[in-house]
Image (tube, grey):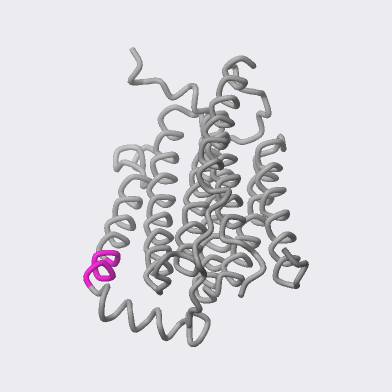
Amino acid sequence: MTFSGEFLAFMGLALVAIIGGVLLLNLTRVVHMVVALIFTFVAIAGIYVLLSAEFVAAVQILIYSGAITIIMLFGIMLTRHNDESESKAGKWRKFLLFLGILGFAIAVYLGIYNFNIDQVPTTLHENNTMQIGQALYSKHIIPFELVSVLLLVALVGSIVLAKKEDKEADKE
Amino acid sequence: MSSVPASAFLALALILFCIGLYGALTKRNTVIVLISIELMLNAVNINLVTFSKYGMAPSITGQIFALFAISVAAAEAAVGLAILIALYRTKKTVNIDEMDTMKN
């Protein structure tokens, strides 16, 4: 394994992503956790660029670091968020959970650590967005249209769920 | 061809998935649980994009699947947050261990 620029870029981005995740677990204030996770999302966008998926990287920055983080911050600000007390569930439960997740991680890692199949040269990096557009509007047109219906249903559903009942609104 | 082996990307996705899983199972604030689930979905997307480049038959389909996963995740975040706001209005709490109406 040579220390090429791609390797260094991968190591840096992976480090930022993992540090963001660890900060999410360890910080005490809720807003700080969300801000730590923005680092992870941006680093994942960089990983997508390394994997020659420029369009997915742009979408990742727009949707995750832009939209979802802001909507989560709204969710935090609109609710009570300043109690920093730890979970009542004891240390034992956390420890057992940690052991279980560690076992899961080791099991999956044994499966992937020597995953090595012959790399085929690809043309994914040439006109990436055009390839995605062509595939999306020819081969995957039905799922694409279904996603528009799904987004409409999610929009209407979340408005209906979050808006006040008429009686409540009249009282106030 | 490439100096970074595909297993390194898969290992990064595994670590992020485990962090998200631990956060979703231990955190007390429901917003953090939701955002941990987003982190797990992101790890899955890394896997999809990795296999779209380094898999047996590299093609653009993996990236398209990742885009669909991102849009479904966005819809899920919006609906989850709306449910959270509705719950907060009735119970005045966002702690996940106090939302036990269905327990008794």
**Residue B36 drawn at (x, y percent):** 54, 43
Magenta stretch holds residue A143 = yes
Q: Is residue A100 above or below residue A44?
A: above
Residue extent of the magenta highlight = A142-148
Q: Nearer the viewer, residue A116 or B99?
A: A116
Total marks shown come to 0
**Residue A122 drawn at (x, y percent):** 48, 79
Q: Is residue A84 above or below residue B52?
A: above
**Residue A147 drawn at (x, y percent):** 29, 64
User: Given the current orientation, which residue lies at the most extreme front position?
Assistant: A118
Q: Nearer the viewer, residue B92 or B28?
A: B28
Q: Main secondary structure of the magenta part?
A: helix
Q: Nearer the viewer, residue B28 or A60?
A: A60
Q: Quadrant of the N terminus of chain A?
A: bottom right
User: Given the current orientation, which residue lies at the most extreme left position?
Assistant: A142
Q: Is residue B6 above or below residue A162?
A: below
x 43%, y 35%: residue: B89
x 56%, y 70%: residue: A51
Magenta stretch holds residue B5 = no
Left or right of residue A140: residue A97: right
**Residue B34 drawn at (x, y percent):** 49, 42
